[in-house]
Image (cartoon, grey):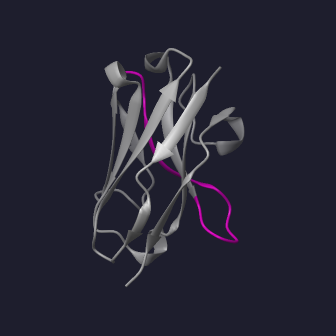
Amino acid sequence: QVQLVESGGGLVQPGGSLRLSCAASGWTFSNYVITWFRQAPGKEREFVALITRYGGTSYADSVKGRFAISRDNAKSTAYLRMNSLKPEDTAVYYCAAHTTFTVDARSYDYWGQGTQVTVSS
């Protein structure tokens, strides 16, 4: 059974940093593209960052240069390092898995439960 569990969210001041983790179990993690999405209150879920099986990455323009996605296949875990956080980064952050490269949230079947990130002074 595919399972994804996010952790690492919390309250941080503007300009601060957080590292989110996405731990996978029940499947061959290294075979999947891992993607982070986020959803703010009243808004649609949006693409944040993606990492392919081979370590290639893609980022939303809004986070490029501030966020970094990585993965450790030996630990079946993906990470999202978030620097220079802004209030507009406040959202629930989800990791998701897919067999192909796509940033369309509607095409993902496997999701974690989400972790809240709040950027506020």
The structure residue drawn at horizontal position 57% and vertical position 35%, both measured from the top left corner, is 102
The quadrant the C terminus occupies is bottom left
| Picture quadrant where residue 72 is located | top left
The quadrant the N terminus occupies is top right
Q: Residue furthest bottom?
A: 121
User: How far from the left and from the top, in percent, is residue 118?
Assistant: 47, 70
Q: Is residue 41 found inside the magenta-colored segment of the image?
A: yes
| Picture quadrant where residue 9 is located | bottom left
User: How far from the left and from the top, in percent, is residue 54?
Assistant: 36, 22
**Part of the protein shown in magenta:** 39-54
Quick check: 117 left or right of 65? Answer: right
68 or 58, nearer to the observer: 68
Quick check: 55 left or right of 3? Answer: left
109 or 1, nearer to the observer: 1
User: How far from the left and from the top, in percent, is residue 12?
Assistant: 36, 71
The structure residue drawn at horizontal position 41% and vertical position 24%, both measured from the top left corner, is 76
Q: Is residue 104 found inside the magenta-colored segment of the image?
A: no
Q: Number of callouts in the render?
A: 0
The structure residue drawn at horizontal position 34% and vertical position 69%, both measured from the top left corner, is 85
User: How far from the left and from the top, in percent, is residue 79?
Assistant: 36, 41
Above or below residue 18? Residue 2 is above
The structure residue drawn at horizontal position 59% and vertical position 29%, both measured from the top left corner, is 3
Above or below residue 38? Residue 118 is below
